[in-house]
Image (cartoon, helix red, strand yellow):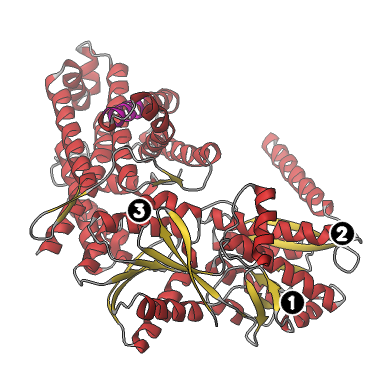
Amino acid sequence: MSEFLQQVINGVSLGSIYALIALGYTMIYGILRFINFAHGDVFMIGAFVGYYAAPQVMKIAGGSVFLSAILVMLIAMIVCSVLGVTIEKLAYRPLRSRPKLTVLITAIGMSFFLEYGGQLVFGPDPKLFPTLFPSAAIVNAKNLVISTNSVVVIVTALALMLLLRLIVFKTKLGTAMRAVSYDHRAAALMGINIDTVISFTFVLGSSLAAAAALLYASVYPSINPLMGIFPGLKAFIAAVLGGIGNLFGAALGGLIIGLTETFVTGYISPTFRDAIAFAILILILLFKPSGIMGRHEAEKV
Amino acid sequence: MRHWKICFTVVLTAVLMLLMITCGSSTNQNEILIGEYSSLTGTTATFGQSTHRGLMMAVQETNDSGGVLGKKIKLITEDDQSRPEEAATAVTKLISRDKVVAVIGEVSSSRSLAAAPICQANQIPMVSNASTNPEVTRKGDYIFRVCYIDPFQGEVLAKFVFNSLKLKRVAVLKDIKNDYSIGLAQFFEENFGALGGEVVAVQAYSEGDADFKAQLTALKGSEPEAVIVPGYYTEAALIVKQARELNMNMPIIGGDGWDSGKLVEIGGAAMENTYFSTAYTADDPDPVVQNFADKYKSLYKDIPDAFAALGYDAGMILFDAIRRAGGIDGAGIRDALVATRDFRGVTGLITIDKDRNARKSIVIITVVNGKLTYKETIQP
């Protein structure tokens, strides 16, 4: 029983990181109706920003672990937001009136550009991510271990998701986002600046990816320029599973993928881990293309 | 019509450039060309860089003392980016384009296994510096190595856990994508079982993974007294770190794939109470080792690890064989390599056995206060 609960904790901690990345996929799809395949690589850039910023910030912040962790996270979120908006402006905006397939291919190109450009700039060898907050194990009577790392990951992810919900449902820009996702043209006629809303969506998605990257790198402190590929793909599957375009669905999908991976690895074999994640994707596309939480809607990609 | 012209121009330029590249490499009569393929970048970059530095030192020392057969050694190095398919491309290039007389490499068994058949088919002797999987030299009679093989390392590790640490129940966590890891795990399990120990659980991961908590949690359930992780340092350090986070404080033991400064850098304080076997340590008081370590330190401002020593030995054994062969003919060098007896290398007294493997001593390293520390030497 204690082993099972332990696996649940492992799975939830991994799943909440996937959920944060999946939110970016789902929001951009909701607004622009295309998959931003470079999203996983924005996640990677977030980790590298943390890698370069952390030593400087720790010097400035002195001994305060909490302050420096928050500062590093903010810096990574800001840099990734700027990156996300720039990618959209340079690569996606000029193609907005073209067929969706064109933008999709550009996104794949952008993804390769970031991955191999990253190898050029950061070097291809794995780097050790600095310890932002030291990890300790909290043990309870039944020999169940919760590391402080897992707690930080789950709590931060939850807080960011609640904050996102607040922004999307309670602010003017959030309302505008929802209006644009419903109908571009009608929203524009109502006086909403579509470009601003799209840029804002990229800011939200990219900063969540940056936050996810710092959590991921804190738990698994070896980072490299290709590290975004698999978490990116898993988060994409999570978004589709939850119903792409749906915020709650993305979070739920992330958790399901994280738990499935952990259970498959722990009880069956890690050989099947990735295969099962992709099998889920295929099954969902075959039997319920709109995902768990999504509504059906005719779409041409 | 215009498109046709553009296409023609592009193809013509490409052909001309290819011709220029192939004609560019001309052989110099006063040089002996030696090829090296190595993981200078990629997941095991530190291994490749270390062996490369060791080999360059051997080349420099040999050339400074007059070279081999009155000629200078010229080393041509190809980076295989830690990928087996690149290793195959690299040796093909070295043999067919650069016309090297012998090849040195690789650290990883997977990469050596990809390159060895190519060397064998071309009858070019290949000396692996650190590939420990037995299959490597079985690829043919032109394939040699200067390190010990996994059956021996597995046997030593099993003896060490059973006799020195006095532990009877162990769990194994191996890398299923890596021939070296699978082999070492298998030979450990066989020997540990023969001694009377019990392997209570086996789990696997894949090179490049970052999350091992699911496997570790499953292993923890079977209550092992030690965990054997026969993989490479990047994953091993993360595994140890996550094991400690799950409150698994038993000894964790690995092979020479752990031998890198990065191990302690990544693993940090979690690395206490871990052990691994390797070919050599710079702490060895032997004057041959100390002399090598001093020279290396003055050249590279770094303490040489086992891979640097193996890279050096691989070069020195090959140059010695060429000297004894009296020529650069592939078959001649091969016969001289086969006849190598009690060669005084940095990593011990090396004898090439009938299977073209090296027989020599092995050392156990442990981590004390964040430092890799010599524990004991085990003779063959």
Q: Is residue A290 visible?
A: no
Whole-Å distance between the Cαs marked 3 and 1? 41 Å
Q: Residues within 10 Å of mark 2 (few under 14, many from 20)?
A: few
Q: Can residue A163 be seen in this view?
A: yes
Q: Which amino acid does label 3 sit on?
A: Ala
Mark 3 sits on what residue?
B210
Across and down, in percent, residue B194 comes to: 36, 89
Q: Is residue A72 magenta?
A: yes
Marks 3 and 2 belong to one chain: yes
Identify residue for label 2.
Answer: B27
User: Tag 3's secondary structure?
Assistant: loop
Q: How crowded is mark 1: few (under 14 residues within 10 Å), some or many (20 or more)?
A: many
Q: What stretch is highlighted in magenta?
A: A67-78
Q: Which label number is shown at residue A4?
A: none
* Mark nearer the N terminus (3 vs 1): 1
In this view, A142 is above or below A153: below
Discs 1 and 2 lie in a common subunit: yes
- Name the residue nearer the viewer: B124 or A94: B124
Is residue A188 toward the left or the right of residue B276 in the image? left
Amino acid type at circle 2 is Thr
Residue drawn 42% across and 73% down? B182
- Asked if residue B41 lies left or right of residue A95, the reply is right
Q: Reply yes or no: does residue A152 show up in magenta.
A: no
- Secondary structure state at the residue bearing disc 2: loop
Choose top left, top right, bottom left or bottom right for residue B93.
Answer: bottom right
Residue at horizontal 55 percent and vertical 54 percent from the top: B46
Mark 1 falls on what kind of element?
loop
